[in-house]
Image (cartoon, rainbow, N blue to C red):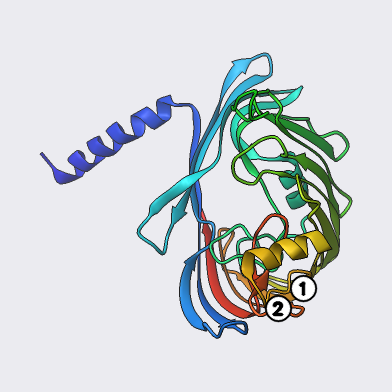
Amino acid sequence: MNKKLIAVAIAAAVAAPAAMAGDTTLYGKVHVSIDSFDNDADGTDNMQVNDRGSRLGVKGSEDLGNGLKAIFKYEMSYDVDGGAAITGARNSYLGLAGDFGTLLVGRHDSPAKVAFYATGAELLGDSVVQLTSSNETGGMLNIEETRANNTIAYVSPSMSGFKAAVAIMPGEGSAATGNDGLADGWSAGVMYKGHGLKAGLGYEDTDDLGGTNTGMTLYNIGATYSIDAFTFGGVYQNQEAAAGGAESDMYALVGKAKFGNNEIMALYGKTENNAAQAAASLAANGAGYGGREGDAFGIAVAHKMSKRTKVYAAYASKDVDGAATGMASVGSNEYGQGGEFSLGMIHKF
């Protein structure tokens, strides 16, 4: 048989199941960087290649009639620069969507996290100038973000630019441990987008949840405003430990200018810990650990090569008052003292 006919037959056989699956999309993002780390604390300067939040996912929906849809997503992290390949589940859920909004059950970003990203203050996520500490090399600040297991969430439809979300999470424990209910953890958020303004307000309580990213309450608020080619704004987050009185505050100011396919970004952030958190940092890390407050600034230049591909150069500098190693917030995300230079590339598909 002609080789071309064989190839066409194989392609048709592979494509058939996908066609029968309805509205199903395979998507992903690959983000890698070449980084130079200059650690002022212990002199461990080095060069690295790092994966920065690469992911692979499948999402889709089915029309159920009368304006109702079944929706699903399964998204996983993928370690591009190492041998671990798939490294864990990201947002993964099954739900219903309609005029009433969206109801979903599974693993999902908390509404407080959604509200943080809705501000637009995270100008270059997963890079050395990000405001959170979610990837393998950390970020400029210790802003906490939760992706919770066992989430039951509702997201309202957009109403004049406003959208609200609320989620509850059972701890799946016992009465003895105090986390046997349906809402051992909960979070809520309000978001707005319109007229050049992006804003978000979120609250989260995981005191009784148990597990990772728990044992604290937090709230965050922020906004950015865009006019012509310029964007500027800020964000604030407060974290308070469930026990011991430890508390942290994080502030950030951001700005961005766009020139054709190019962007220039600048960020400044500050972390402050109260005496209880400073004492906890000292106890956990020993003498020479500042633990009270620190500053960070970053600058980045990005060039959009296409709708799906971007390259960038970024630099972040972090300084912790009186510290020899670093600083941690209530969320226990440390960042080292020194500078980081990064050349990165992002491709979405």
Label 2 environment density (alpha carbons within 10 Å; few <14, some 14–19, many ≥20): some
Classify residue 194 as left or right of residue 289.
Answer: right
In the image shown, does 317 or 214 lie closer to the viewer? 214
Dot 2: what SS? loop
Relative placement, left or right, of 314 versus 245 is left
> x%, y% of residue 145?
68, 50
**3D distance between C-alphas at marks 1 and 2:** 9 Å
Q: Name the residue that disc number 1 marks.
A: 294
SS state under label 1: strand
* Nearer-the-camera pick, 169 or 123: 169
Task: Please identify the residue farthest to the left as the structure is shown.
Answer: 1
Decide: few, some or many residues near mark 1? Use Cα within 10 Å; few <14, some 14-19, many ≥20: many
Q: Residue at x 29, y 39 (%)?
A: 11
Which residue is more in the foreground, 1 or 222? 222
Give the percent coordinates (x, y) of residue 17: 36, 28
**Up-down: is 147 above or below 83?**
above
Q: Is residue 237 visible?
A: yes
Res 323 label: 2
Amino acid type, mark 1: Gly
- Residue 56: x percent and y percent? 47, 47
Q: Is residue 343 above or below residue 143?
A: below
Residue beneath the point at 48% across and 68% down: 50
- At a point 79% along the width and 69% down the height, the residue shown is 292
Left or right: where 216 falls relative to 305:
right
In contact (CB < 8 Å): disc 1 and disc 2: yes
Quadrant in which residue 187 is drawn = top right
Q: Earlier in the sequence, mark 1 or mark 2?
A: 1
Give how far across and how far down residue 287 sits, in percent.
67, 75
